[in-house]
Image (spheres, rainbow, N blue to C red):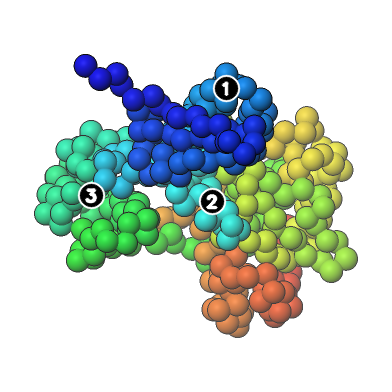
Amino acid sequence: MALPKSPFNIQKRKDSKTFLLTLNNTSGLPEKVCRKWQRRSYQNLPRDLILFSQPKSYQAAQAGAFALINYLKNNLKNERAQKVDIDDITVGEWVKKFTSMETSPRAAINASRNRPYSITTIEGYLYYFNHYIKKDALSALLMDELEEEDILEYTTRLSGRKNYKGLPLVGTRTFAGVIIFLRMAFKEYQKRNKQWVNPFLALSPPKYHNKVRDALTEEEVIKLFMPGVLLDRMEQAVCSAMFLAGLRRAEIFALTPDCLDWDTPKITVKQAWQNFGNRNAVLGPTKGKKERVAPFNDVLQQAIKALWEENGQHQYVFSFENGKTPKSEWFKQRFKIWLKRAGIELNGRKIVPHSSRHSLASMLETGGVPLRQIQEFLGHSDLSTTKIYLHTTDKAIRDIGAQISTAIDG
């Protein structure tokens, strides 16, 4: 019986004292790797193995050969861990990669474009995966073997499920979100396998129309600032930031004193709380991942000065005396109380804190500000364009502020 071939052959040069190394497939390495190591000098060893590059004896050459085999095997393991195996990965394994910042194939691309994922986005993906993808039969199918029929069957199963309220999932924001999430993940897979036929290509993405939040009228906004509605400095300052600067809740409580330019005047919105209202909230970029400029009206300026006189100046502009900022629950409860104190009847309208931005947009439009400029003012375009129209909106903001000042004075 023939003895198994050695994992390597070592040959000593006749014209010198150096050694040549040949790796065999019995080393456990792929054939293509072994072919690269046919009668190669030890001086060609990787830099990490430089200590083995000049063996003085056959035993030292053997040690170098074993070190090289282990080195190449570890490299292959690392490459496999980082590289997607196009043929063997399942739908569940591929899609799960997008539920973590560390493993998402899109994370680095987005970061390079200065548009990193927000924590909220990743948590949304994780929720979709755990509740609507992970345990479905689609998850066990190989990506390379997927067909359009598999996606149609999955969509049918998903549409028959119930949401947390016990109502049909189809037609909801969650239903659309799950399908759009899968489409995004499959599109990324296609980029890595040009020959793969994306089963979503022939299917249109579902459409979901968000419920429109209603706006308060100008008269109702003025009512919020009447005596007896905003009872303390914090309420006055926060409400002013909402209705006169158009700031989102997560942006208001992330403002720092250096964001306020008292001379121009203007507010530079640089950051916002991610997962605002969650114990895992962290500071991150604003929605849209861009800084923007917001107006800094006299009413808001006076409200912030009064707040600082009462509570002192802290890390964040809107802070209590102990330096802590209001939480999401404080905000929700106060907003409902303000509406009640002001005697504002909803009459079936959907009025929520975010309605302040819609209300301000409505008032600006009434004041003659073009819609395009309003969109940019609310943070939907780049900073340079916002700077151009800031003075255009200033007059409309001043007019609104003047009415509010009158209301505050009673």
Residue 405 percent coordinates (x, y): 75, 63
The secondary structure type at the circle numbered 2 is helix
Q: Is residue 124 above or below residue 106?
A: above
Mark 2 touching mark 3, by CB under 8 A?
no
Residue shown at the point (32%, 38%) measured from the top left: 93
Q: Quadrant of residue 67?
A: top right
Quick check: 182 left or right of 203? right
The three-letter code of the residue at mark 3 reads Asp
The three-letter code of the residue at mark 2 reads Ala
Q: Is residue 389 above or below residue 17?
A: below
Q: Residue furthest top?
A: 1
The three-letter code of the residue at mark 1 reads Tyr
Relative to the observer, which residue lies in front, 148 or 372?
Answer: 148
Residue 214 visible in the snapshot: yes
- Residue receiving disc 1: 58
Mark 2 to mark 3 CA distance (whole Å): 24 Å
Image quadrant occupied by the N terminus:
top left
Q: Quadrant of residue 369?
A: bottom right
Q: Residue furthest front?
A: 14
Task: Give the number of the mark in front: 1 or 3.
Answer: 1
Relative to the observer, which residue lies in front, 35 or 331?
Answer: 35
- Residue receiving disc 2: 108
Residue 321 percent coordinates (x, y): 79, 33
The earlier-in-sequence mark between 2 and 3 is: 2
The earlier-in-sequence mark between 1 and 3 is: 1
Mark 1 to mark 3 CA distance (whole Å): 48 Å
Mark 1 touching mark 2, by CB under 8 A?
no
Mark 1 to mark 2 CA distance (whole Å): 47 Å
Query: Which class describes the residues within 10 Å of circle 2: few (<14), some (14-19), or many (20+)?
Result: some
Mark carried by residue 400: none
